[in-house]
Image: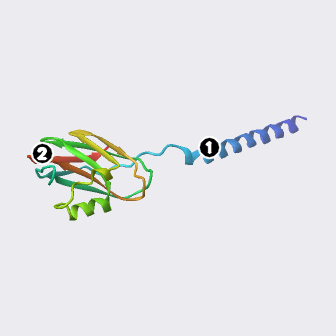
Amino acid sequence: MKLIRRRRTFAIVGIIIALSLGIVISSIPYLPRPHGSLQAPETHDIRAGTESNPGVFALTLQGISAGASFVIGVTVTNGSATFCVIDQGTYLTWAFNNQTMAFPYSSCILRQDTSQGTLTFSPPTTGNWNVAAINTSPSGITVRFYPA
């Protein structure tokens, strides 16, 4: 009688462990994923500019997945900048024609004016995205992008 109870207890314990492991393994895809960021800091000088001819530097982020959370820290020395996260195709079209077109702010999935802060965004489509730092002040600035 004791042997049968012991076997039954081990069987029940085994079933509970198997079900618990199944629940844990099946819930892994639903866990929050950490955000993406830069691998290393980068610093760039940006020339003085105006509204019609801004100084711009674009940091290219390659192969960002749609819906992935991405976070970048920024610090501006000698002023502030407008940061625009824009798909690479739209940015390049503007860059090649920038003498004849205003900057396409309406295409920014994130637009933020700051001298120091964190840029957080999730692209709607997979691909290459640019974080453009735009300077419209009469003096040059230095922008530091860093992992956040």
Crowding near the residue tagged with mark 2, few <14, some 14–19, many ≥20 C-alpha atoms within 10 Å: some
Residue 93 location (% of width, % of height): 26, 63
Horizontal side of residue 23 vs 128, given as left or right: right
Residue 1 location (% of width, % of height): 91, 35
Crowding near the residue tagged with mark 1, few <14, some 14–19, many ≥20 C-alpha atoms within 10 Å: few
Q: Amino acid at mark 2?
A: Ser
Q: Which residue is mark 2?
A: 137
Residue 13 location (% of width, % of height): 75, 39
Q: Hey, which residue is sitting farthest left in the picture?
A: 139
The residue lying at 19 percent from left, 47 percent from top is 143
Secondary element at image label 1: helix
Earlier in the chain: of badge 1 and badge 2, it is 1
Circles 1, 2 touching at the beta carbon (< 8 Å):
no
Foreground mark, 1 or 2, reads 2
Question: What is the CA distance from the residue labelled 1 to the residue labelled 2?
Answer: 54 Å
Residue 124 location (% of width, % of height): 42, 53
Q: Which residue is mark 1?
A: 24
The residue lying at 32 percent from left, 62 percent from top is 89
Picture layout, residue 117 above or below residue 43: above
User: Depth check: 1 or 140 in front?
Assistant: 140
The residue lying at 24 percent from left, 41 percent from top is 113
User: Depth check: 9 or 49 in front?
Assistant: 49
Q: Quadrant of the C terminus?
A: top left
Secondary element at image label 2: loop
